[in-house]
Image (cartoon, rainbow, N blue to C red):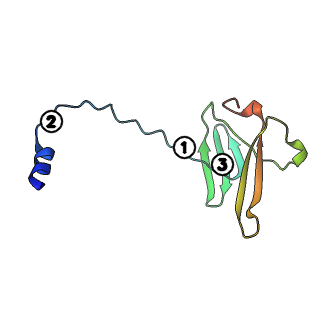
């Protein structure tokens, strides 16, 4: 049995053409912080790790979180929620982000 397996592994095989390996996607970094300054295309943020400067591309998409109320939620809005474990209710919401359909990149 061992020699049969060795023969299989080392035996002559027909050539198999494999598709080229996928190119890895460009790394996208997410930076969260408070805006300290904007000079030209350089945005400086105050983050938990300290000040960070980011060079913005001309077509950069910027998003801002602002406090709101539940009455601001409309039919068709996309909601992203953050939660932490909770003993009684399984999860406790810590924040909800309302994304109106007008800013979604793909229609829902």
Q: In the picture provided, is 47 more to the left or to the right than 98?
A: left
The mark that comes first in sequence, 3 or 1, is 1
What kind of element bears circle 2? Answer: loop
Mark 1 = which residue?
A: 28
Q: Residue furthest front?
A: 1
Residue 10, disc: none
The image quarter containing residue 43 is: top right
Closest to the observer: 34 or 101?
A: 101
How many C-alpha atoms fall within 10 Å of the one at disc 2: few (<14), some, or many (≥20)? few
How many C-alpha atoms fall within 10 Å of the one at disc 3: few (<14), some, or many (≥20)? some
Residue 13, disc: 2
* Residue at 79%, 38% in the rendered image: 77
Mark 3 = which residue?
A: 44
* Residue 73: image location, x then y, percent: 85, 42
* Residue 63: image location, x then y, percent: 71, 41
Q: How far apart are the alpha carbons under marks 3 and 1?
A: 18 Å
Marks 3, 1: nearer the viewer: 1
**Tags 1 and 2 touching, CB below 8 Å:** no
Q: How far apart are the alpha carbons under marks 1 and 2?
A: 41 Å
Q: Quadrant of the C terminus?
A: top right
The mark that comes first in sequence, 2 or 3, is 2
Closest to the observer: 11 or 67?
A: 11
* Residue 64: image location, x then y, percent: 75, 44
**Tags 3 and 1 touching, CB below 8 Å:** no
Relative height, residue 106 to residue 11 (above, below): above
């Amino acid at each position: 049995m061992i020699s049969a397996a060795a023969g299989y592994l080392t035996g002559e095989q027909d050539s198999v053409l494999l598709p080229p390996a996928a190119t890895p996607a460009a790394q996208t970094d997410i930076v969260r912080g408070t805006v300290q300054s904007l000079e030209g295309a350089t945005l400086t943020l105050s983050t938990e790790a300290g000040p960070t400067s980011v060079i913005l591309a001309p077509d950069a998409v910027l998003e801002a979180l602002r406090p709101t109320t539940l009455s601001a939620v409309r039919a068709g809005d996309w909601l992203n929620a953050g939660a932490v474990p909770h003993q009684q209710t399984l999860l406790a919401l810590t924040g909800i982000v309302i994304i109106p359909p007008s800013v979604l990149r793909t229609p829902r």
